[in-house]
Amino acid sequence: MRLAFRPIVLAAAMLMAPGIGSGVPPRAETVAKLPAQAQVKRVLDRVYVVEDRRLRSTSFTMLVNAGCVDEPGGVCRGLAHYLEHLILTGRNAEHTDSAFRMFAGGYSNGTTSHEATTYIHRVPVRPEGAVADLEKLFTFYAARLQGFEITEADANRERNVVLQEYNVRLGSSVEGRLRARMLETLLPGHPRSQPAIGWPHQIAALSLGDARAFHRDWYVLDNVAFVVSGPTPAVEVEAIARKALAGVTPRPSPQRPPRTVRPPTEAVTLRDSDPQVQNPVLILQKLVAVPESDRWSSRGARLLLADFLQSRLDGSPHEVLVEGSKLATGIGLDLSRLAPRQVALTVRVPLDGGQSPEKVVEAVEAYLRDLGRTPIPAETIERLRTRRLERRVLALAEPQRVADEVIDWLSGNDRYEDLALWPDRFRAVSAEQVAAYAAALAEPSRRVVGILTPREP
């Protein structure tokens, strides 16, 4: 079961005809290849279908808008992820097989992020059709919304499986452990400061009772969504879903408290060394307060600025710091939204040329100050915007990507109705808004520097 680290998302133009409302005329050869049937249909309030007769498999996802940030006390202990394991491996009376063994030759898995949990199944289309498979899946997960059954012995076994997963995915990664320590230092007291899987001592303390309480709070019909893609007609999926979900008892989900971190402005340096490390690396993280008159303009400005920071365009970090000043052989940057008006800037620089970490940090901060004083040219912003919108038009050619983008959009607790409006809102983001966002990155703020170096075994 995978842990999902939600990336920066841009879902645009998926539900619209090519070239309509995007503000960017797609290339003629691109338009000619776009199938009209790669569209999303909302057949019930929380059920979405991407119907395409060419698909050779059926994809089914149940999305639960609850992740580790929703765990009791605002402490991310890995409870949401542990429950994901129990849901997939438990056996209710009406289902003698676990979800993993439903379909021979199929794919079944779950993912847990800070904000959401997803259950994913992909089943090859059989000669007799996919209706029976969808009936089985909708019936199974409708029952899981009502409750789940698992023995204490199986629950204990799955807790050990989670511990093994931690060791494989995070415990064995020296840089992953350092990044986790840095995030705890950057966001003290915030659930996003901890990995979604939890720390080993927290995982070991999880109980079946904890999981049942979390399930009772968050696994409610109004807090889930189902996304299906495949050759089955949408009208048939609607009938299957309506029948399966008719017996699910409605229950309210808890209200989420606002979570904002305002730690003091200070600089902290963490160091680690390990025989596994081949080349030293520096990681810089800043907690940044950004302008946010509304979520849409802020999201668009962040995406455009992130694209610029990750590019090799004139004035980008790569052009200035790598090609220009030869500070390093490479540089990686990311911008992640943490809460309203708060983002984390992460910069990764390999120290393979013997650079002084202090010099690297000084150069990065100087670059951010210059970026705040000298706005990115409007034509560069438009070029970045065009690239993103064209990629979304191309996504119409792949029904599974359309379905995946819908899942990604909904997993951020965004309204489905806003998805069709997003291209116009993204197009309306101005160069001035991007400049204001860039200027915020240069302001003094909490900063954590991580330095990872080799060590003799």
Image (spheres, grey):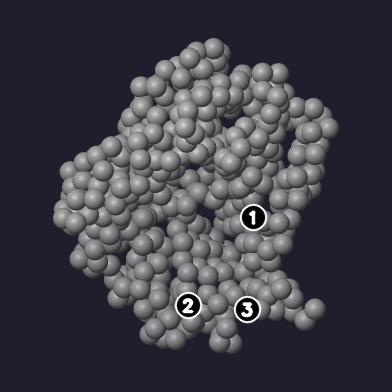
Label disc, if present, on residue 205 of the rendered structure: none
Asked which secondary structure carries label 3, the reply is loop
Mark nearer the N terminus (3 vs 2)? 3
> What is the quadrant of the C terminus in the image?
bottom right
Picture quarter containing residue 98? Answer: top right
**Please, which residue is most extreme toward the right here?**
153
Q: Is residue 88 left or right of residue 32?
A: right
Residue at horizontal 71%, vertical 52%?
166
Out of 97 and 211, give the one closest to the viewer. 97
Q: Position of residue 7 (x, y in %)?
A: 47, 52
Residue on which disc 2 sits: 330
Q: Is residue 369 above or below residue 421?
A: below
Mark nearer the N terminus (1 vs 2)? 1
Asked which secondary structure carries label 2, the reply is loop
Residues packed near mark 3 inside 10 Å, few (<14), some (14 to 19) or many (20 plus): many
Q: Position of residue 36 (x, y in %)?
A: 24, 39
Mark nearer the N terminus (1 vs 3)? 1
Disc 3 from disc 2: Cα separation: 13 Å
Q: What amino acid is at disc 1?
A: Glu
Q: What amino acid is at disc 3?
A: Pro
Label disc, if present, on residue 184 of the rendered structure: 1
Picture quarter containing residue 354? Answer: bottom right
Disc 1 from disc 2: Cα separation: 26 Å
Residue on which disc 3 sits: 280
